[in-house]
Amino acid sequence: MTQSGSSMQALVLRHDGFSGRVGGLAIPDLAELLAFERIAVPRAGPGQVLIRVACSPVNPSDLHYIKGEYGQPRRRGTPAGSKAPAPSLPPVMRRVPPWSASG
């Protein structure tokens, strides 16, 4: 098992819950919704792996989530986005079992 630090940088949400409004994808001032912070590296639980992510695309669903317009509520202080939690996560396991679409 390899561990490359106990903290990482992430864009974290500044607000909880839903915004109560629906708008377009534009975000005039990202600083109103996100903060760039150093947070603890998450730990993988049983049957999980932690994967280092160098960069990740921003999807329209991510923008709606950050704005509080998506189908799940925001949680203040957690990494933004719905696909990968944050960049630069250290690997927890070296071997990942094969994945099968059939389950």
Image: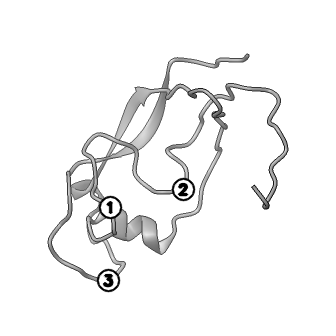
Residue 42 in picture, x, y percent from top left: 49, 29
Q: Is residue 1 left or right of residue 44?
A: right
| Number of residues whose C-alpha sits closer than 10 Å to that of mark 1, classed few (under 14), some (14–19) or many (20 or more) | few
Q: Earlier in the sequence, mark 2 or mark 1?
A: 1
Query: x, y (%) of residue 32?
Result: 21, 57
Residue type at numbered disc 2: Lys
The x, y position of residue 12, in whole percent, is: 34, 44
Quadrant of the image for the C terminus? bottom right
- Seen at 60% across and 55% down, the residue is 56
At a point 73% along the width and 16% down the height, the residue shown is 1
The Cα–Cα distance between marks 2 and 1, rounded to whole angstroms, is 13 Å
Name of the residue lying farthest toward the left: 20
In the figure, is residue 21 to the left or right of 12? left
Q: Which mark is residue 72?
A: 1
Q: Are circles 2 and 1 on residues that touch, CB within 8 Å?
A: no
Under mark 3, the amino acid is Gly
Please name the residue that numbered disc 3 is placed on.
24
